[in-house]
Amino acid sequence: MANTKAKIFIGLGIATFVGIGTYLVFNHFKKKRIMRDIYSKLLDTSSQESQQAQLRKSDKLKGTDALNPNFWQSGKADVNKLITGAKARELADELDNWILKFGIGNASVMPIIRKIKTRGQGSQVAYAYANPPKNYGDLANDLNDELSGFFDSDKSYDQVLNYLNNLPA
């Protein structure tokens, strides 16, 4: 009888040891997989979030798809929600006029920015801003410079950035 109890305790000890060992091994591989997924997402430069994660706070407008002149042509934008070239040039003119007036704060740029309803439309405006017949330059750089000046508040910059980042494709 004593021999049977000893065998049961030894069996339970082995089962516990194997169970704990198996748990530790699987937990190790699970953590390794999670870390691999995190690192692959950080290294992925095709998404807007990863592009902005690599930029300084003052340059985050440059990483948004809404101000990327090539985003609307990449196939990621919803083609049913794109605007006409004339409308894009009109919005580019309005933004250029605002920038040339040295951007008198957020109150004057947000009504123009709010006319953009999708990231694809914003991309079209950035394309019209940068290419003929307008050739004003890079919209992301110009807006970034205008909204992050010495006398400008972070609130206006963050408001524009949040609006553009939350637009649908």
Image (cartoon, grey):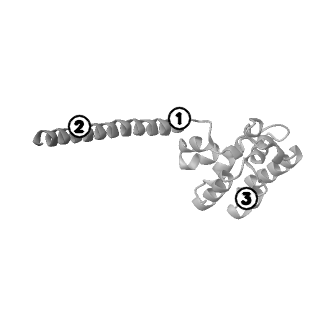
Q: Which residue is mark 2?
A: 14
Residue 48 position in % (x across, y down): 62, 43
First-in-chain label (2 vs 1)? 2
Residue 164 position in % (x across, y down): 68, 52
Q: Answer yes or no: do the residues labelled 2 and 3 have beta carbons within 8 Å?
A: no
Residue at point 51%, 35% (across, down): 40
Q: Which residue is mark 1?
A: 43
**Dot 1 lies on which element?**
helix
Q: Quadrant of the N terminus?
A: top left
Q: Amino acid at mark 2?
A: Ile
Residue 56 position in % (x across, y down): 53, 46
Q: Amino acid at mark 3?
A: Val
Q: What is the CA distance from the residue labelled 2 to the residue labelled 3?
A: 71 Å
Q: Is residue 84 above or below residue 107?
A: above
Residue reaching furthest left? 2
Q: Which one is in front in this view, the residue at disc 3 or the one at disc 1?
A: 1
Q: Which residue is mark 3?
A: 109
Q: Which one is in front in this view, the residue at disc 2 or the one at disc 1?
A: 2
Position of 169 with respect to 52 (left or right) is right
Q: Quadrant of residue 120?
A: top right
